[in-house]
Image (tube, helix red, strand yellow):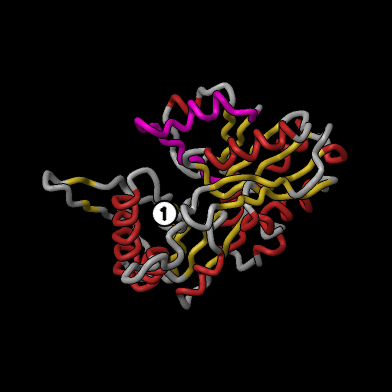
């Protein structure tokens, strides 16, 4: 195991990193989540990869629990970048041989590079906890939008839940604003598990929970891989959570959380240390990650 010393910040804001131990002809694993301060975290990651490469590392695997810019996966207007592709290609160009990340927002983004990009799923981490608090025979897994139905189906399969559905948002063609919601499944008398890859404002989860409650759902839980819970003047994620119908929100420790999130009564942070340890062990020993069941 090679540890890299904490980065040094110069007065002008520049970052310097250094690898202390010898890494010649070794397989170096660099674990770096790109939040908070995603731009600083990204530069740190790139500099660490370059340092390992210049230290004659045999192979460099970048483990990125949360990949920033992953939601910027397409052009929405002319002269706009596909930012996640830029990030991935830069990581490849600087010297990474492999990237492993969790619950990438748009999986097709991995096609931007020519090195392996393994996308593992938080459902593997959440499963033991969810089976402690939920009965699969009375559980409906719901995606807060139609685009996340594949992810919801993965949770349903892993938990053997009895139902699956999504929320279909109807938008005004002139204004683009959401005018109505349709829940495409029966939830009356059932517990509902809302699943998503990233939670920021919690607006979509709140709306889906309210709709499920109106349709007769019993308890409502949410499981989200990456909790980016912001507190701004007009958007306070924790306040939205407090006022929502969600009974419990599960997130992973893929990013560092402030105390107000760690101590929130509705939030439980599920650790991933064993998850990543198994991934590193398997990767180092040439064992396919398929054997761990991480892609279900």
Identify which residue, 95 or 140, lies in the foreground: 140
Q: Magenta stretch containing residue 23, yes or no?
A: no
Q: Answer left or right for 177 relative to 19.
A: right
> Residue at image x 67%, y 60%?
295
Position of residue 167 measured from the top left corner of the image (x, y, whole percent)? 67, 48
Neighbours of disc 1 within 10 Å: few (<14), some (14-19), many (20+):
many
From this viewpoint, which residue is outermost toward the bottom?
A: 114
Answer whether residue 127 is visible to the viewer in this image: yes
Position of residue 138 measured from the top left corner of the image (x, y, whole percent)? 85, 37
The span picked out in magenta is: 225-246
Identify which residue, 117 or 221, lies in the foreground: 221
Residue where numbered disc 1 is placed:
68
> Residue at image x 62%, y 54%?
121
Q: Answer left or right for 276 relative to 126.
A: left
> Residue at image x 27%, y 47%?
7
Instruction: Find residue 118 and report its image quarter.
Output: bottom right
């Amino acid at each position: 195991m090679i540890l890299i010393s904490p980065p040094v910040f110069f007065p002008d804001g520049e970052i310097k990193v250094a690898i202390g131990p010898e890494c010649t002809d070794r397989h170096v694993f660099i674990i770096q989540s790109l939040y908070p301060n995603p731009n600083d975290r990204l530069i740190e990651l790139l500099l660490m990869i370059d340092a390992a490469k210049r230290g004659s590392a045999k192979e460099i695997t970048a483990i990125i629990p949360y990949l920033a810019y992953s939601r910027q996966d397409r052009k929405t207007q002319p002269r706009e970048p596909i930012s996640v592709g830029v990030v991935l290609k830069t990581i490849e160009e600087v010297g990474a041989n492999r990237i492993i990340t969790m619950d990438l927002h748009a999986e097709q983004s991995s096609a931007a590079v020519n090195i392996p990009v393994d996308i593992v799923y938080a459902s593997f981490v959440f499963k033991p906890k969810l089976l402690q608090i939920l009965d699969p025979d009375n559980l409906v897994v719901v995606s807060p939008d139609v685009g996340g139905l594949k992810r919801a189906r993965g949770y349903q399969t892993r938990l053997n839940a009895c139902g699956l559905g999504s929320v279909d948002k109807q938008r005004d063609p002139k204004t683009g604003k959401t005018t109505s919601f349709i829940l495409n499944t029966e939830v009356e008398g059932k517990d509902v598990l809302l699943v998503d890859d990233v939670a920021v404002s919690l607006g979509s989860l709140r709306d889906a929970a309210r709709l499920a409650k109106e349709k007769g759902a019993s308890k409502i839980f949410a499981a989200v891989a990456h909790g980016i819970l912001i507190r701004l003047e007009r958007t306070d994620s924790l306040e939205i959570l407090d006022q929502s119908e969600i009974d419990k929100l599960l997130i992973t420790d893929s990013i560092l959380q402030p105390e107000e999130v760690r101590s929130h009564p509705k939030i439980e942070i599920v650790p991933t240390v064993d998850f990543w340890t198994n991934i590193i062990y398997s990767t180092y020993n040439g064992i396919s990650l398929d054997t761990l069941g991480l892609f279900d």
